[in-house]
Image (cartoon, rainbow, N blue to C red):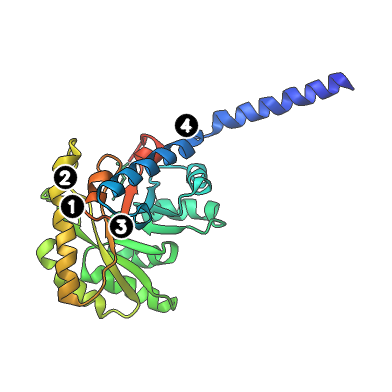
Amino acid sequence: MEAEEKERRKRSTKLTRDRIAFMPVGVEKIAGNLEQVRARIARAADRARRRPEEVTLVGVTKSQPAEAIRAAYEAGVCDFGENRVQEWELKQPLLADLSACWHLIGHLQSNKARRAARVFHMIDSVDSLPLAQKLNDAAAESGLRLPVLIEVKTDPEPAKSGVPEEEAFELGAAILRLESLELRGLMTVPPFLQNAEEVRPFFRRLARLRESLRQQLGRALPDLSMGMSHDFEVAIEEGATQIRVGTALFGARTSA
Ligand SMILES: *Cc1c(COP(=O)(O)O)cnc(C)c1O
């Protein structure tokens, strides 16, 4: 009897060890990482005389397995951002039981708008009117109102996506006429600069642009999505209401 029990225990520890071995690197670290990110958010909010609750943490899960996303959710993250429709379509069935808000934060081609509207709750990267129209059609068909952000191009690099600053008003005004879209604000991906302080002018420009669009369009535009792992404190100081954090939560990505 005793030997049997010993054997059973041995088997069960072995199983656990195997499980751990198969767990993606870092899953057990996510809760601790989250605590550190939350502390960084709180300090930055404090410096800016803002409340930490004003800042929504969007966990960026591109290249992360479903288990990592689940671990972050269980640790308290409620918003997640993926870059590609196809990648999220593969993971979504494994996470259908979580009541999180799923954002698309990567460039979206118009021909994938319908699929995107089906699997995401919010599209943070709208950068053209044809895309907005396709999203509007898809949302109308499913009878819902889809929240969107306009992605503004602040990085001078030609290959980077987003609408140029000077075209944001026109696109915003056009989106307001699309009844199945809800224009919530602006998003940007500034150039990657090692020294986060050097990114500040880009964040400030986006905050100012939101201010002028608010006045010109006569809408609240509550969301300002800016700031990633290495520069989100500066973004919070400049008024970010959503920060998109991948590496600081999940560890370095093996592929992008
Ligand atoms: C990958 C990505 C992020 C997160 O970047 P980290 O540096 O890993 O925090 C944020 N926003 C967008 C649009 C991304 O593609």
Is the residue marked 3 within 8 Å of ligand 1, measured from its CB?
Answer: no
Query: Where does residue 105 sit, x and y in percent of width and height?
Result: 32, 55
Whether residues under marks 4 and 1 lie with C-beta atoms below 8 angstroms apart, the answer is: no
Q: What is the C-alpha distance between the residues marked 2 and 1?
A: 7 Å
Q: Callout 4, which amino acid?
A: Val
Residue at the (73%, 25%) spot, across then down: 11
Residue at the (64%, 30%) spot, across then down: 16
Left or right: 219, with 200 as reference point: right
Labels in figure, total? 4
Q: Which residue is mark 4?
A: 25
Q: Which residue is mark 2?
A: 199
The reply to whether residue 171 is in sight is: no
Q: Which residue is mark 3?
A: 241
Mark earlier in primary sequence (2, 3) = 2
Viewer-nearest residue: 254 or 173: 173
Residue at the (34%, 41%) spot, across then down: 40
Whether residues under marks 2 and 1 lie with C-beta atoms below 8 angstroms apart, the answer is: yes
Whether residues under marks 2 and 3 lie with C-beta atoms below 8 angstroms apart, the answer is: no
